[in-house]
């Protein structure tokens, strides 16, 4: 089993019924014949519950792991706006053309392809790194995070990427100067600093 498969198996257990029972070493009841945990019945014809939810313990482990691997745009913005060292380095992993189109003030530009050659020159190995790429439909930040982790860096991926930074109304810089758009009401509350989540 590769290191990536071990990580996936450890942090992303297969929910009961999806591909057999999850093997977590717990004393949780084995699934009933319909794929639901013993003592429960999965609703017939319900696509949400066709595969039953994980046990609370499995869910807690999975979501705790997710928070260890990810952060989001509003939390990064709040940390950068606090007026002190945020304790991490924000890295934009896109191309130079993408960087010129718009980037987050204070971010370090390090394209994914250059990480093996330049990370050691630009990044402090004892300082956590937060990476981002274009947006939710792009896995560039995931590839960059993997490359940095392999090199020994602590790394988180900023969910939403540059797209949601701009859509949530945060300031960015372009080749032509500073820019900012109004917050998209589908991604952030209008006129309120904290979304409450």
Image (tube, helix red, strand yellow):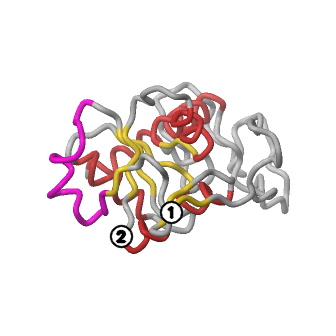
Q: Mark 2 to mark 1: distance in Å?
A: 18 Å
Quarter-wise, where is residue 60 in the image?
top right
* Residue 104 belongs to magenta span: no
Across and down, in percent, residue 12 comes to 49, 45
> Does residue 143 appear left or right of residue 66 in this picture?
left
Quarter-wise, where is residue 59 in the image?
top right
**Residue range (magenta):** 110-126
Please tell me which residue is depicted at 57% across the width and 45% down the height of the picture.
Answer: 72
The residue lying toward the viewer, choosing from 51 and 116, is 116
* Residue 116 belongs to magenta span: yes
Across and down, in percent, residue 128 comes to 35, 35
Across and down, in percent, residue 186 comes to 79, 58
Please give the residue where the numbered disc 1 appears in the rendered image.
177
Q: Of helix, strand and loop, which mostly describes the magenta segment?
A: helix
Please tell me which residue is depicted at 58% across the width and 56% down the height of the picture.
Answer: 160
Please give the residue where the numbered disc 2 appears in the rendered image.
95
Please state, as top left, top right, bottom left or bottom right, where the C terminus lies in the image. Answer: top right
Please, is residue 149 above or below residue 183 in the view?
above
Q: Residues within 10 Å of mark 2 (few under 14, many from 20)?
A: some
Q: Secondary structure at mark 2?
A: loop
Q: Secondary structure at mark 1?
A: strand
- Name the mark on residue 150: none
Nearer the observer: mark 2 or 1; the answer is: 1
Residue 9 in sight here: no
Across and down, in percent, residue 35 comes to 68, 50
């Amino acid at each position: 089993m590769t290191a990536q498969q071990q990580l996936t198996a450890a942090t992303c257990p297969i929910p009961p019924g999806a591909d057999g029972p999850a093997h977590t070493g717990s004393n949780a009841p084995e699934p009933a014949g319909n794929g639901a945990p013993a003592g429960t019945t999965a609703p017939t014809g319900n696509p949400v519950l066709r595969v039953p939810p994980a046990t609370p313990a499995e869910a807690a482990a999975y979501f705790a792991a997710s928070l260890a691997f990810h952060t989001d745009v509003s939390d990064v913005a709040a940390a950068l706006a606090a007026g002190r060292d945020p304790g991490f380095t924000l890295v934009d992993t896109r191309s130079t053309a993408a960087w010129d189109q718009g980037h987050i003030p204070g971010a370090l530009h390090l394209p994914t392809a250059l990480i093996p050659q330049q990370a050691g020159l630009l990044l402090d190995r004892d300082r956590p790194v937060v990476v981002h790429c274009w947006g939710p439909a792009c896995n560039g930040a995931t590839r960059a995070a993997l490359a940095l982790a392999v090199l020994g860096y602590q790394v988180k991926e900023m969910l939403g990427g540059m797209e949601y930074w701009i859509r949530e109304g945060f300031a960015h810089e372009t080749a032509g100067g500073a820019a900012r758009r109004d917050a998209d009401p589908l991604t952030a509350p209008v006129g309120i600093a904290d979304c409450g989540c």
